[in-house]
Amino acid sequence: MNEMNETTTVEMFDHTGHTVSQMTQAETLDRVSESAGSWVFANNQMIQLEQLAQADWGTIGTIAIVPNLVGG
């Protein structure tokens, strides 16, 4: 299968709860770009957009897009 058409599970968290979707790599990269300031995790490790773009999509696993947390 073409890697660009493979999908993975993407969990998006926000103030209303969370949504789970199946997305291609291009769709996921677009969503991450639209979520400026959010933290992105792949396989439970924080990852940068550039790393996500270079990742082997067949082995990426679940992606979580989480609003950054501010303590204080």
Image: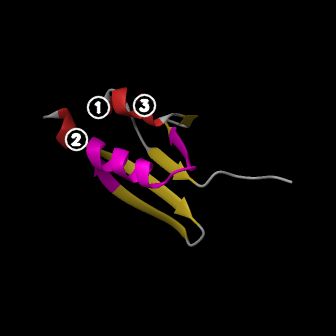
Q: Residue at x 31, y 54 (%)?
A: 22
Query: Of circles 3 and 1, which is in front?
Result: 3
**Image coords of residue 52 (percent x, y):** 41, 33
Spot occupied by residue 51 in the image (x, y as percentages of width and height): 43, 28
Q: Is residue 15 visible?
A: yes
Relative height, residue 34 to residue 45 (above, below): below
Residue 72 placement, left or right of 60: right
Q: Which callout, 3 or 1, points at the residue further toward the start of the chain?
A: 3
Q: Amino acid at mark 3?
A: Glu
Q: Quadrant of residue 44?
A: top right
Which residue is labeled 1 in the image?
Answer: 58
The structure residue drawn at horizontal position 43% and vertical position 43%, both measured from the top left corner, is: 62
Check disc 3 and report the residue beneath it: 50
SS at circle 1: helix
Write the start and end of the magenta stretch as one range. Answer: 22-41
| Among numbered discs 2 and 3, the one appearing first in the sequence | 2
